[in-house]
């Protein structure tokens, strides 16, 4: 059937169209607001738990065989880098310019810390606080839609190692592609 529109029905059709379009716009902006709110909440929780972890891991390192060693300095530097990368992500999210590379920067620091925490038995509090940070990092990856897997803890399982290696290569390729795009855009906008 072909529906014929009469000029007298046109105002009603236009009103219905405007209402439908307004609803879709409100729904889309509401979804965007929820997503941005989720991102900010995850980052705020990550900051809180990273601050707590920073204190407990520092105390645990002071009471371990790593006290006054280069490794202690490196771990503390990694925690500082994680905090810095998280702050940068928070600022870029607030300015609506955060991208997957910013999230990968945070996750990469977390991966290095996780490798240290998996290999070294520190205090119960430091381990507990690290699990909270690790959980926050997983949540961060989900909220930003980033594929993320931690390094396998067993080195004997070659299937796990191969899978993890493939994922690291994929993340490297994605990061390289994103860098190339942003670098090209930067050059296009420069003199």
Image (cartoon, rainbow, N blue to C red):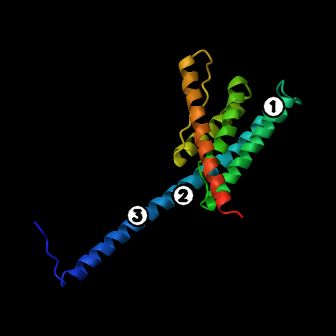
Q: Quadrant of the C terminus?
A: bottom right
The residue under the point 72% across, 43% down is 82
Q: Quadrant of the N terminus?
A: bottom left
Which numbered disc flags the more N-terminal residue, 3 or 1? 3
13 sits to left or right of 77: left
For discs 3 and 1, the disc positioned in front in the rendered view = 3
21 sits to left or right of 115: left
Residue 27 circle label: 3
Q: Residue furthest left?
A: 1
The residue under the point 89% across, 30% down is 68
Label 2 neighbourhood size at 10 Å, few (<14), some (14-19), many (20+)? some
Against 69, is 11 above or below? Answer: below
Which numbered disc flags the more N-terminal residue, 2 or 1? 2
Against 14, is 112 above or below? Answer: above
Q: CA distance from mark 3 to mark 1?
A: 49 Å
Q: Position of residue 92 (x, y in %)?
A: 65, 57
The residue under the point 28% across, 78% down is 15
User: How many numbered callouts?
Assistant: 3
Q: CA distance from mark 2 to mark 1?
A: 36 Å
Against 11, is 145 above or below? Answer: above
22 sits to left or right of 59: left
Q: Are marks 3 and 2 in contact (CB under 8 Å)?
A: no
Which numbered disc flags the more N-terminal residue, 3 or 2? 3
Residue 61 circle label: 1
The residue nearer to you, when weighing 153 against 2, is: 2
Q: Please indicate, yes or no, whether residue 135 appears anywhere in the rendered image.
A: no
Q: Position of residue 41 (x, y in %)?
A: 58, 53
For discs 2 and 1, the disc positioned in front in the rendered view = 2
Circle 3 sits in a helix, a strand or a loop, which is it? helix
Q: Are marks 3 and 1 in contact (CB under 8 Å)?
A: no
């Amino acid at each position: 059937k072909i529906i014929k529109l009469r000029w007298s029905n046109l105002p009603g059709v236009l009103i219905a169209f405007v209402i439908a379009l307004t609803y879709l716009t409100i729904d889309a902006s509401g979804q965007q607001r929820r997503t941005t709110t989720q991102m900010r909440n995850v980052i705020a929780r990550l900051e809180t738990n990273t601050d707590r972890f920073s204190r407990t891991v520092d105390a645990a390192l002071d009471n371990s065989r790593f006290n006054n060693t280069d490794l202690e300095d490196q771990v503390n530097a990694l925690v500082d880098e994680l905090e810095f990368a998280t702050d940068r992500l928070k600022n870029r999210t607030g300015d609506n310019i955060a991208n997957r590379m910013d999230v990968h920067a945070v996750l990469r620091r977390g991966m290095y810390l996780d490798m240290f925490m998996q290999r070294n038995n520190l205090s119960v509090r430091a381990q507990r606080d690290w699990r909270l940070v690790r959980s926050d990092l997983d949540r961060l990856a989900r909220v930003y839609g980033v594929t993320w897997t931690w390094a396998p803890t067993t080195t004997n399982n070659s299937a796990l190692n191969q899978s993890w290696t493939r994922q690291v290569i994929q993340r490297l390729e994605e990061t390289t592609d994103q860098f190339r795009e942003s670098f090209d855009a930067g050059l296009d906008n420069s003199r």
